Image (spheres, rainbow, N blue to C red):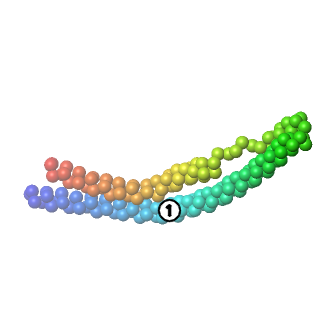
Amino acid sequence: MEKASEAYSTKERAELLLLNLQKLRAEVSSIEAHYDILKADYTKICDDAMLKISSIKTDLADALESKIGQLEGTKSEMSGLEARLDSGLVPAEIRLKAKEVVHQGVTPAPRSPQAIIDKAADCIEFGLDKMGDGIIFPPEKMVNAWTAIFKTANWSTKRRTRI
């Protein structure tokens, strides 16, 4: 009688394990399909982000070059004005008015271009980290599902042997 009971328990355990294995197989194929789709989407998002980064870097470099050119022009105007004032060619009143006009066109110098690029790179790195988490997440769930099934099967076996 004990052998029959033990054989029946073994049969039930094997059936449970097969059922769990079939469920896991369905979940794995579903997860793999989602993984491929998500990976393709995230790769496209990453490529688009890299294109935007290069575009922003180019725009920032062009804007910086433009500002530097404006600043150089303003500096040359100021040095010419100083030279004419020192030589007595320009009255002091005209110099003050000219300085006001020149300073109105000058904007404060932006932070260094490297600081701006570093800030943009930090933001991009944060976004890419989050995308990476999305790519890693589905396989992690698959591993957790396998672990849960084996723990359940092991727990069921232990419970039956105690009874």
Q: Is residue 54 visible?
A: yes
93 over 137 or under it: above or below:
above
Which residue reaches farthest front? 87
Residue 36 appears left or right of 60:
left
Q: Secondary structure at mark 1?
A: helix
Percent of width and height locating residue 143: 35, 57
Residue at 72% across, 55% down: 65
Percent of width and height locating residue 105: 80, 44
Q: Dot 1 corresponds to which residue? A: 39
Residue at 89% across, 35% down: 93
Q: Amino acid at mark 1?
A: Lys
Percent of width and height locating residue 23: 35, 60
109 over 157 or under it: above or below:
above
Towards the viewer: 118 or 152: 118
Instruction: Give the position of the N terminus as an image quadrant.
Output: bottom left
Residue 23 appears left or right of 79:
left
Residue at 83% across, 38% down: 100
Residue 37 appears left or right of 19:
right
